[in-house]
Amino acid sequence: MSMKVRDLMTSHVVTCATNATCEDAAKKMRTEKVGSIPVVEGSKLVGIITDRDIVVECVAQGKSCSETQVATVMTKNPITCTPEIDAHEAARIMAKEQIRRLPVIENGTLCGVCALGDLAVVDIHVNEAGEALSGISEQTQVH
């Protein structure tokens, strides 16, 4: 029997609004010990902001994190999946798209996040998670 993303994902997901500041998002990341936060309008996912987005698109450009809105630095319309897809497929998507986190959408609403680490803790997915991370790392080193 295959494992579904629903069985692995984090369902308690902290989000922020598009008009939140990068400072607000960074504080949430610190409190929650996460590297990204889905950005929502109501319950609809519109983007995702990562710690890297804040550093590269805000801090490194001399913008004020307390004034810059998340909407200006987030990744818009991120790659997503449904809770019913197979965990192997989630790993393949992450490797192909060079991403570490997949927001999980059900009936148009954000219901969780499946991270590379979620796949790695399940024995049957260790190889795929490792391959996905390897692919992501190789792509990062090329840039």
Image: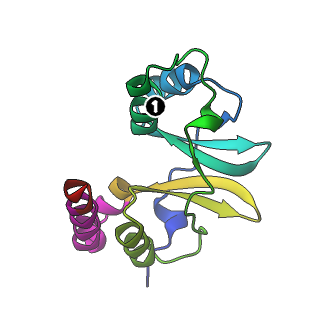
Residue found 44% across the figure and 78% down from its top: 89
Q: Position of residue 25 (x, y in %)?
A: 55, 27
Residue 115 belongs to the span the image colors magenta: no
Q: Position of residue 70 (x, y in %)?
A: 61, 32
> Which residue occupies the extreme right position in the image?
42
Residue found 80% across the figure and 42% down from its top: 42
* 143 lies left or right of 34: left
Q: Position of residue 73 (x, y in %)?
A: 55, 37
Instruction: Please name the predominant secondary structure of the magenta segment in the image.
Output: helix
Residue 15, can we see it? no
Q: Quadrant of residue 22?
A: top right
Residue 52, can we see it? yes
Q: Position of residue 32 (x, y in %)?
A: 47, 30
Residue type of the residue flagged with mark 1: Ile
Question: Which residues make up the magenta segment?
Answer: 119-138
Residue found 59% across the figure and 67% down from its top: 83
Q: Nearer the viewer, residue 110 or 69?
A: 69
Could you tell me which secondary element the residue under label 1 belongs to?
A: helix
Say which residue label 1 marks.
54
Q: Nearer the viewer, residue 101 or 84?
A: 101
Quadrant (top left/top right/bottom left/bottom right) for the C terminus: bottom left
> Which residue occupies the extreme front position in the image?
61
Quadrant (top left/top right/bottom left/bottom right) for the N terminus: bottom left
In this view, 83 is above or below 43: below
Residue 128 belongs to the span the image colors magenta: yes
